[in-house]
Image: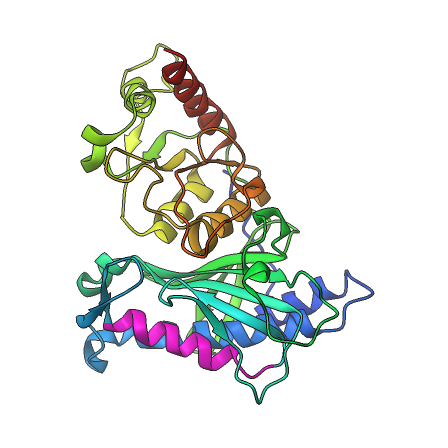
Amino acid sequence: MPIVKTSKLITIERHITEEGAMHPDATGEFSHLLRDFTLAMRILARDVRRAGLNDVLGQTDGTNIHGERVKRLDIHANDVIFRAMDHGGHLCVMASEEADGMIAIPDEYRKGKYVLVFDPLDGSSNIDVNVTIGTIFSIYKRVDPSLNTPGTLEDCLQHGWKQVAAGYAMYGSSTQLVYSSGNGVDVFTFDPTIGEFLLTYEKIRIPKRGKIYSVNSGNAHKWPQGVRDYVTHLLKPSDDGIRPYSLRYVGTMVADIHRTLHYGGIFMYPGDTSMPDGKLRLVYEVNPMAFLIEQAGGRASDGVKRVLDIKPTSLHQHIPCFMGSEEDVLEVEEFLRAASSE
């Protein structure tokens, strides 16, 4: 099994402290930032669990920067994270998938050396039907950590390999927080009876190859030929029993990546004829997940090159993505190269 279940009873606060001790020059600012963020996740775990009772389901009358109808719970999640993070003095700027541009830290609060970018509620199409949803986040150091001025757009548009931490919270049958600060991937499960995230799995490793593929097959008629050829290959039985693969697709990136981290296989959201750059956002979704996948021993690609080597050009930039088990991602890259050379 790829999962290493811990026998130690460790809260996320203790885990953050122990990881901070690995860096003798640490000031504690990063640890405090993470603690503030876990407070937001506790609040959202409660609110999502009571969404129907709290009257925060349904849509608003507005659309976001992407032209999508905004769910009421999207707005609530965005507000909770902002209010938990704006005053701690650790951040110089934030950016959210639900905001048109950067989110400034209010003038009255100190500006720190970190940048937070986040998707407040991933899986909006699943909110009203009680299917798993989540929050995705990524933390960077600002380009010049010595500054105490408001952050800039350049601070938000950094290469993915510069992330100092990334992760997601998943609100499902239980609430889990999966994150990495560059020292492997750890999974914490929220125990509402004591109000703590407890370490559940530590340093998880994604299998080199899986037997599951995850993709929105409703777009198959619009896919590039290489993706069509690859999926046809996955469904063709092989003599060694590796194929056929099983299709599993939730439609919430958090849920699909969570399964892929544990069981292996591949998650794909390719570009197509209607959206050549795909649907997912590099800054808020693809980079954080690519960081986790690589930290767990997997591979994340846009079909041609490593995701984390791509410099974002805008906050809401879209990008095709293929991530998961190393051998599976290498294989789809081969199919894409073969199709492009024909």
Say if residue 279 shows up in the picture.
yes
Q: Residue at x 38, y 20 (%)?
A: 242
- Magenta span has 80? yes
Residue 153 drawn at (x, y percent): 54, 62
Q: Residue at x 75, y 70 (%)?
A: 146
**Is 45 left, or right, of 107 in this rendering?**
left
Where residue 265 sits, quadrant-wise, is top left
- Magenta span has 181? no
Residue 114 drawn at (x, y percent): 63, 68
**Is 52 left, or right, of 34 in this rendering?**
left
Q: How many marks?
A: 0
Q: Residue at x 44, y 75 (%)?
A: 81
Q: Main secondary structure of the magenta part?
A: helix
Against 194, residue 5 (above or below) is above
Residue 299 drawn at (x, y percent): 52, 35
Task: Report the residue that reaches farthest toward the right.
Answer: 24
**Is 328 left, or right, of 166 in this rendering?**
left
Against 25, residue 338 (above or below) is above
Against 136, residue 5 (above or below) is above
Report the magenta residues as a range. Answer: 72-88
Q: Residue at x 51, y 40 (%)?
A: 307
Which residue is nearer to you in this view: 316 or 254?
316
